[in-house]
Amino acid sequence: MKESLVRMYHSACKFLASHDLPTILRELHKIDLAVVAKNPYTWLVTVPIAISLLWKKKFKVIIALVSIFLFILLAQNTLASSSGSRVHLQDVLLFVGGTTALLGVNLYLLFIRE
């Protein structure tokens, strides 16, 4: 198990090293959530995983997955899609506030309230 976690960590580091923030943001903006939601394969994968997590009472994993999804939505809706365009102060404040709220909720639910 430790070896697989180390491999996943190294692959994530390799991905982040090869892609800069504007490239990652551009890729996030390319995701069309309406198309993803209508794709039957999304449901064939998501529903059994969600049922098994609920059945095993893995609420911390569910909270982490929902938080990652919400962070992607937050980044997709607030940050500029291209590296040359400017980001408005209101969008930056919304992103910082939303990220702070997500971090606070995660810290409380995952670590403080046990």
Image (cartoon, rainbow, N blue to C red):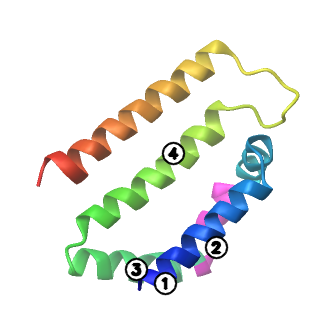
Q: Which of 13 and 63 is in front in this view?
A: 13
Q: Residue 49 carries which label?
A: 3
Q: Name the residue under label 4.
A: 71
Element under disc 2: loop
Instruction: Tell me where residue 30 appears, x and y as whole percent.
Output: 77, 52
Q: Which residue is drawn at 42% across and 61% down?
A: 65
Q: Which amino acid does label 3 sit on?
A: Ile
Q: Do the residues labelled 3 and 1 touch (CB within 8 Å)?
A: no
Q: Which mark is residue 39?
A: 2
Compared across the picture, whether 69 is left or right of 12 comes to left
> Could you tell me how far apart the alpha carbons at marks 1 and 2 are, in whole angstroms?
33 Å
> Could you tell me how far apart the alpha carbons at marks 4 and 1 are, in whole angstroms?
28 Å
Q: Are marks 2 and 3 in contact (CB under 8 Å)?
A: no
Disc 4 residue crowd, few under 14, some 14–19, many 20+, Cα 10 Å: some
Q: What residue type is labelled 1?
A: Glu
Sequence-first disc among 2 and 3: 2
Q: Nearer the viewer, residue 51 or 26?
A: 26
> Could you tell me how far apart the alpha carbons at marks 4 and 2 are, in whole angstroms?
22 Å
Sequence-first disc among 1 and 2: 1
> Could you tell me how far apart the alpha carbons at marks 2 and 3 are, in whole angstroms?
16 Å
Instruction: Tell me where residue 43 appears, x and y as whole percent.
Output: 52, 76
Q: Mark 1 points at which residue?
A: 3
Sequence-first disc among 3 and 1: 1
Report the mark closest to the observer, 3 or 4: 4
Q: Which amino acid does label 4 sit on?
A: Phe
Report the mark closest to the observer, 2 or 3: 3
Quadrant including the C terminus: bottom left
Element under disc 1: helix
